[in-house]
Amino acid sequence: MSFPVATIDAAALRSNLAVVRRMAPRSRVIAVVKANGYGHGMIRVARALADADGLGVARLADAVALREAGVTQRILLLEGVFGVEQFALAAKEQCEIVVHSPEQLDALEQFAGSHRFIVWLKLNSGMNRLGFRVEDFAAAHARLQRCSSVSQIRVMTHLSSSEERGHVTATQLKVFDDLVAPLGLERSVANSAAVIGWPEAHQDWVRPGLMLYGMSPMPNQTAAEFGLRPAMTLSTQLIGVQNVGVGEPVGYNGIWRAQRPSRIGIAAIGYGDGFPRGTRNGAPVLVGGKEATIAGRVSMDMISIDITDLPQAKAGDEVVVWGEGLPAERLAPYADTTCYELVCRVTSRVPLLWKGA
Ligand SMILES: *Cc1c(COP(=O)(O)O)cnc(C)c1O
């Protein structure tokens, strides 16, 4: 078997979907599979989550790939489409589209095909990324109502800080509900953190991504506390061991030095695989199931690990850098990033090995 490898657990994906359903029992679920299923492999993720009520992707090309693979589920284009040709392709692929800008409204009004779209009108409720501002929303809604290419209108917004129980989200929810509740349309607000922490945001449709992959969006609560199981385990092997004396440096630029006679395990994974080069010394990894720490600069194809306290550790041992037994959330702060980015940037040379499919 080659290494490193990202083992993807289809049973964990399904079980995490069940957690979403338990937490948001009255909502339908759009499983977000953008960015290649958060690095897990979009098409197989979509198949594993065939019980979701729909799939959410950022780009039209993803929808095309899903349809080519035979996926017939509802697909929602979370950023909508751009220009008349893309509207035609979205129609052909039977996609539902977000409309967040006047340019998209113009294009939809010019769309001459026979397809009638389910359109998710997006409100900018305070994040100031995509969506119509409050003062422009009613006019946009009226234009959609008049548009002959629209079969149904739903409304959505996105939260900027839902992992906190603070006033930012409370304000966004109030802005959204005050404006759209009177319309009586189906609504969607919640990403993973809002599924977990903001029941009032569940509404008709939830849009979880991260939690389906078994990671926690909450700063102080682990995925396990919510019954979530990591779907990706990124692992490799020790390919060598060095004994180094006190004061000796390890790796490029010698950013780690032995404070005691030390054993350094060299594992075959590096930034060429998506393991962040900026990861600091002291970051946790599992060697043969036991925790050890990164010692020295991450190289393109290798990392070095202080295994002094694991006398049994030897070349050939399995090394887990995140996943089962070591959540990606633990590594992320040592690399000044989030688990979202860690899983997304696993590179294409790392094979995805599915189990439980
Ligand atoms: C990515 C995304 C989601 C999912 O967010 P998570 O934090 O991964 O659950 C939901 N809605 C929109 C609009 C998104 O772009």
Image: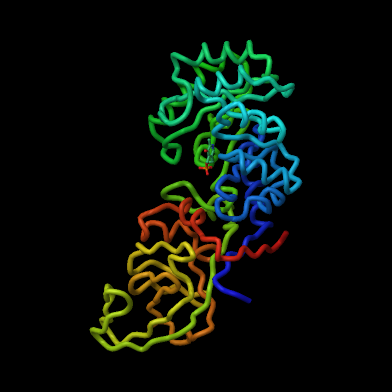
Can see residue 317? yes
User: Is 187 left, or right, of 257 in this rendering?
Assistant: right
337, above or below 189, in the image: below
Rendering quarter of residue 245: bottom left
3, above or below 62, in the image: below
Image quadrant where one finds the N terminus: bottom right
Q: Nearer the viewer, residue 35 or 335?
A: 35
Q: Residue at x 36, y 89 (%)?
A: 243
Residue 285 percent location from the top left of the image: 45, 70
24, above or below 126, in the image: below
User: Is 300 left, or right, of 36 in this rendering?
Assistant: left
Image quadrant where one finds the C terminus: bottom right
Q: Residue at x 54, y 17 (%)?
A: 180
Q: Residue at x 40, y 76 (%)?
A: 305
Residue 272 percent location from the top left of the image: 46, 66
Residue 227 percent location from the top left of the image: 58, 52
Residue 163 percent location from the top left of the image: 44, 41
